[in-house]
Amino acid sequence: MRVVVRVLLGLLLVVVVLAAVVVVRTLTFKGGATADLADVKVAAPVAMDVDLAARHLSQAIQIPTVRHQERADDVDAEWTKLHAMLAASYPLSHAAMQKVELASRTLVMTWPGSDPSLAPIVLMAHQDVVPVTAGTEDDWRHPPFGGVIADGAVWGRGAIDDKGSLIGIFEATETLLKQGFRPKRTVIVVSGGDEEAIGQGAPAAAAYLKSRGITVEFVLDEGLAVLLKNPISGGKLAVIGTAEKGYATLKVTAPATGGHSSAPPADGGGVVTLARAVTAISDKGFPLKFTGPGADMIRSLAPTAPFAVRMAVANEWLFGGLMTKQAAATASGAALLHTTIAPTMLKGSPKENVLPQDATAFINYRIAPGDTSADVMARAKNAVEGLPVELAWTRKPNEPSPVSSTTSWGWKMVAATAGAVAGAPVAPSLVTAGTDSRYLAPVAKDVYRFQPVEFEMSDIEMIHGTNEHMTLKNLEKMLQFYARLIVTSAG
């Protein structure tokens, strides 16, 4: 009996000690490894003309710089119109900046600073937009390329992605020039012409900067935004992307003999083989891990989160599995914590009563930092072992970007300005889509991805979707953010 009592007392002591450790770690937890922004003096608000900016954004939307799936369908003259519109709307900027046009109508515009010893900063926003799905035009409240200003917003394709940022940057430079501002640090505006086509514009810009021996202090591009109700604490949060996933599409081909559908082979033919292969690859997914920028967002918010969340984050060694499960409760949450696998396209026979001579599937991967395209290919090959299929990339994969610092000077400039304009705390996170900025990583100390627009989670659906629009409130925040960032970091 004494032995049993001793064992029970021992177990009780372990529980008490464990509880004490958990509580102490929770109460002393300081959050993620991000810089203290208290010492950053953010520039004061700048007087900006929001109505004029709205008219300029309207004009830009009315120029349909659409990049199609087939580049032969693109209309190059639309880029000529957009460049002319920018030159006419922002004469001081074009006079002060050295303009270079590169591949795919990409613009690199350099506003020289007075101190050449200071590394430049780069602000990015692409010119091109995605098409509007044929037959959905009547679903829009206003014509998708009408640029209508109504209901407190500017409506149309590209209002958010990404002509809003493009106009915001030039409104900022033009206004600052009118007010007599001259930067000490060089400011470079890079505007890709084919971001939506994963094209050659941004790589050409990176090559151009490299050829001139330029290494920039930081790059800022689109990516994340201000969430009005973040999933951790429920409050407003400015989320800045410190990295983005890689991009790769795998082509899976199942060769077959073809023939008449009235006499199918015993194994079902190429389509059945392909279905088995796609299912096998999808079933062998990448494990969820509470690591990287996605987890950093939760760590950064933990000190102000409810006690249970703070306790879990402060004691990852004990609650890591639970946090991973909770974060992955939604598709968007899960995407932050692992490499995703998405079969998207299938191709078989051209006719219903003909067996295909080959069946093909395309699987899109978004590769998380820590994984590589080689890891993806190895996992896929392992999944289809024994099946008569061929695997190949449709094009050279984009690897995940490096993870940028959350303690550097560049982070302080971007994060402090974002927090000041948004009136909200700031946290790093992972961009699960792709941006042009990834190509500039080799010539930059840090790369960040952020637009100062306030979103409900449901608002994200309008990007590449129906009824895309920029509210005038968000447009004003856009103008203030770029102007104050330029003055804070380059003044």
Image (tube, grey):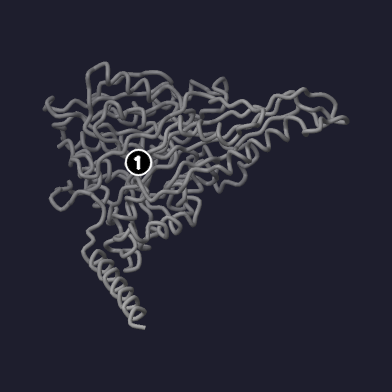
Q: Residue under circle 1?
A: 53
Q: Quadrant of the N terminus?
A: bottom left
Quadrant of the image occupied by residue 444: top left
Q: Crowding at label 1, few (<14), some or many (≥20) Cα neighbours within 10 Å?
A: many
User: Residue 387 or 410: which is nearer the viewer?
Assistant: 387
**Is residue 262 rendered to the left or right of residue 51?**
right
Residue at the spot x=33%, y=57% of the render?
317
Residue at the spot x=56%, y=20% of the render?
72
Residue type indicated by callout 1:
Ala
Q: Is residue 16 above or below residue 466?
A: below
Q: Is residue 336 above or below residue 365?
A: below
* Whether residue 36 is visible: yes
Instruction: List x then y, in percent, for residue 199.
Output: 45, 24
* Whether residue 484 is visible: no
Q: Is residue 195 above or below residue 471?
A: above
Q: Farthest residue in the bottom direction?
A: 1
User: Secondary structure under badge 1?
Assistant: helix
